[in-house]
Amino acid sequence: MSDSTTRAGFVALIGEPNAGKSTLLNRMVGAKVSIVTHKVQTTRARIRGIALEGATQIVFVDTPGIFRPRRRLDRSMVAAAWGGASDADIILLLVEAHRGLTDGVQSIIDALKEQETRTPVALIINKIDRVKSEVLLALSRQLNDAFTFERSFMISAERGHGCDDLRKWLAETLSEGPWLYPEDQIADLPMRMIAAEITREKLTLRLHEEIPYQLTVETEGWEERKDGSARVDQVIYVARTGHKGIVLGKGGETVKAVGQAARAELEEFMGRRIHLFLQVRVRENWQNEAERYSEMGLDFRDGG
């Protein structure tokens, strides 16, 4: 297609942790490119997923949830979220229908006002299946009184309700221009990072204590084999010696189950055989190491 007939641009998803940003990204792209769990603060880096709607290429930026940061890692995550918003052509603010206008949502709205952004901001009320229609309408009025949104959409990212209308509006609103990525590309994350995110998701789902926020996963080695398969070596870094035993589990059963689940999803994602090997290492100060941040796609300096 010529440049005059195509459209492209960046759409940032912002909101509180667990608002459904990763679920919406995966729904829009039609494939799983962002970590989704019941835990908050699971997305750490700005993850780009790429969707096509007609002649428009929509590049979604799934940002970490915006919350009150306490640690260096938290501060870097929040900085990444606002960085993703400032670079976007359109901003989507996701609000959970059943939680409404929380203090956290209000603080995001206040920040958008302070920045005096000229970027169009659309309101996305998500998880609409959890409340009655009259509650939704009242919440929409309340939020539109609090901020001048370009448009408002009521959706269920999990079920897909309202997502087609949102995608069509985005496709019509983005500016004309050439596509930014090849037609068959669905994410701009390196495969090594996607693989690490998949393993971290399985750990997060398996471990129900605070430990998921005290660990990170890095793909240390990737070896392509002649038979078309790949050997993937990953390291799970934990902050305390006691955490290592929890991740390993009795007789290594936990890390084995995590590895099996991660391998199965990696094989489905890539459409080929994967040999996944996991190690668990203790690095007490990993949350203050610049190298760990670059592996997660975060800027260490933002957490200073």
Image (cartoon, rainbow, N blue to C red):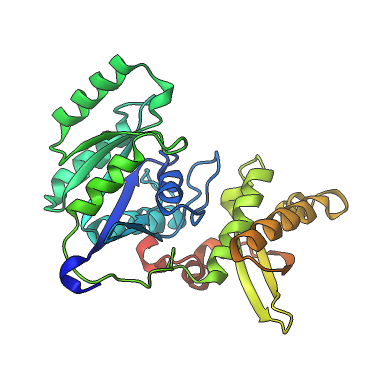
230 or 30: nearer the viewer: 30
Q: Is residue 255 above or below residue 297?
A: above
**Residue 145 figure quarter:** top left
Q: Is residue 86 above or below residue 120?
A: below
**Residue 35 in the figure: left or right of residue 272:** left
> Residue 23 location, x and y as percent?
46, 44
| Quadrant in which the C terminus is drawn | bottom left
| Quadrant in which the N terminus is drawn | bottom left
- Can residue 63 be seen in the rendering of this structure? yes
Q: Residue furthest bottom?
A: 226
Q: Residue furthest right?
A: 251
> Residue 83 location, x and y as percent?
29, 60
- Can residue 215 be seen in the rendering of this structure? no
**Residue 200 in the figure: left or right of residue 20:** right
What residue is drawn where x is 44% and y is 63%?
186
**Residue 134 figure quarter:** top left
What residue is drawn where x is 25% and y is 62%?
9
**Residue 177 in the figure: left or right of residue 102:** left
Q: Is residue 14 above or below residue 38?
A: below
3 or 115: nearer the viewer: 3
**Residue 105 in the figure: left or right of residue 209:** left
> Residue 142 location, x and y as percent?
20, 24
What residue is drawn where x is 32% and y is 47%?
14
239 or 66: nearer the viewer: 66
Q: How many marks?
A: 0
Q: Residue furthest front?
A: 1
> Residue 41 location, x and y as percent?
47, 46
What residue is drawn where x is 21% and y is 29%?
143
